[in-house]
Amino acid sequence: MLWVAGCYCNAVALPKGVVVPKRVDSLERRRAIAEAVFRVSASRGVEAISLRDVAAEAGVSMGMVQHYFRTKDEMLLFALDHMRERVAGRLGTRLARLPEPTPRDLARAVLTELLPTDEDSRAEGAVSVAFYSRAAVTPRYAESLREGLRGLLDVTAQHLRAAARDGQLRPGLDAEQEAASLFWLTHGLVGPLLVGLYTPDAAAAILDHHLDRIFS
């Protein structure tokens, strides 16, 4: 009957008092639940998350969460995928603000977007770090993490290969090796930022130091 609500009712008036069921976007519901996962994880950690906790945080019933996710693992894996979408969306916005970006600008934008520097990215960072302990013993988590990390590393390498072609890297450097070094350096700063060892400005300064080292 949702088709009726979307199309037929435009042409034929419904009887008085009849309420048309509101169309539900299941993907948006899943994303809203994933957002609640991030908030709960940021305050209590991934291991403390339960379907009930997330339902309460999302302001929905336990039954609704179970309708979209049969298990905690299903919910967390979807949240991990959703986290990639959030990062990609922010990165797209950041890149759009660069009028004529150089390969160095593009590489820096990708890498700095991975750092937990505000409330949203800190929640994502906490979830990401916690997933490693689960991935070490759960193949599905390991596969999901590998896929995401490989994609981000490939994007970083693309920008450094472009810089090498344009003569913007210092002579004698291997673009693939430098991309891996920069990417894992950035990844290694996530934990220290989360626990307050470095400030966002200090972490950015470390990243810029290494970018200055390889770019001519």
Image (spheres, helix red, strand yellow):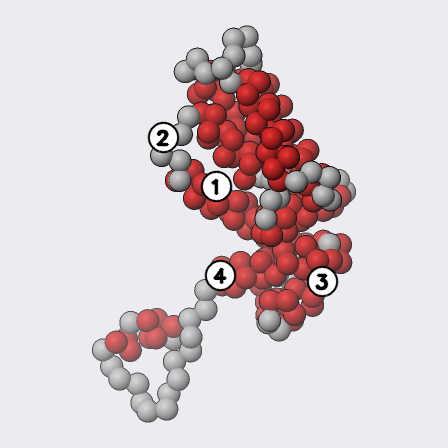
Q: Earlier in the sequence, mark 1 or mark 4?
A: 4
- Give how far across and how far down residue 131 sits, in percent: 70, 45
Crowding near the residue tagged with mark 4, few <14, some 14–19, many ≥20 C-alpha atoms within 10 Å: few
Q: What SS does tag 3 mark?
A: loop
Give the distance between the C-alpha atoms of the residues marked 3 and 1, in whole angstroms: 30 Å
Crowding near the residue tagged with mark 2, few <14, some 14–19, many ≥20 C-alpha atoms within 10 Å: few
Task: Answer left or right for 119 relative to 169.
Answer: right
Foreground mark, 3 or 1? 1
- Give how far across and how far down residue 139 sits, in percent: 70, 42
| Residue of label 2 | 100
> Residue at left 67%, top 60%?
40
Foreground mark, 1 or 4? 1
| Residue of label 3 | 50
> Is residue 154 among the parts visible in the rendering?
no
For badge 3, the amino acid type reads Ser
Q: What SS does tag 4 mark?
A: helix
- Give how far across and how far down residue 65 sits, in percent: 61, 66
Crowding near the residue tagged with mark 3, few <14, some 14–19, many ≥20 C-alpha atoms within 10 Å: some
The answer to whether the residue labelled 1 contacts the one labelled 4, judged by CB atoms less than 8 Å apart, is: no
The answer to whether the residue labelled 2 contacts the one labelled 3, judged by CB atoms less than 8 Å apart, is: no
Q: Earlier in the sequence, mark 4 or mark 2?
A: 4
- Give how far across and how far down residue 20 sits, in percent: 38, 80
> Is residue 166 among the parts visible in the rendering?
yes
For badge 1, the amino acid type reads Leu
| Residue of label 4 | 28
| The label number, if any, that marks residue 91 in the structure image | 1
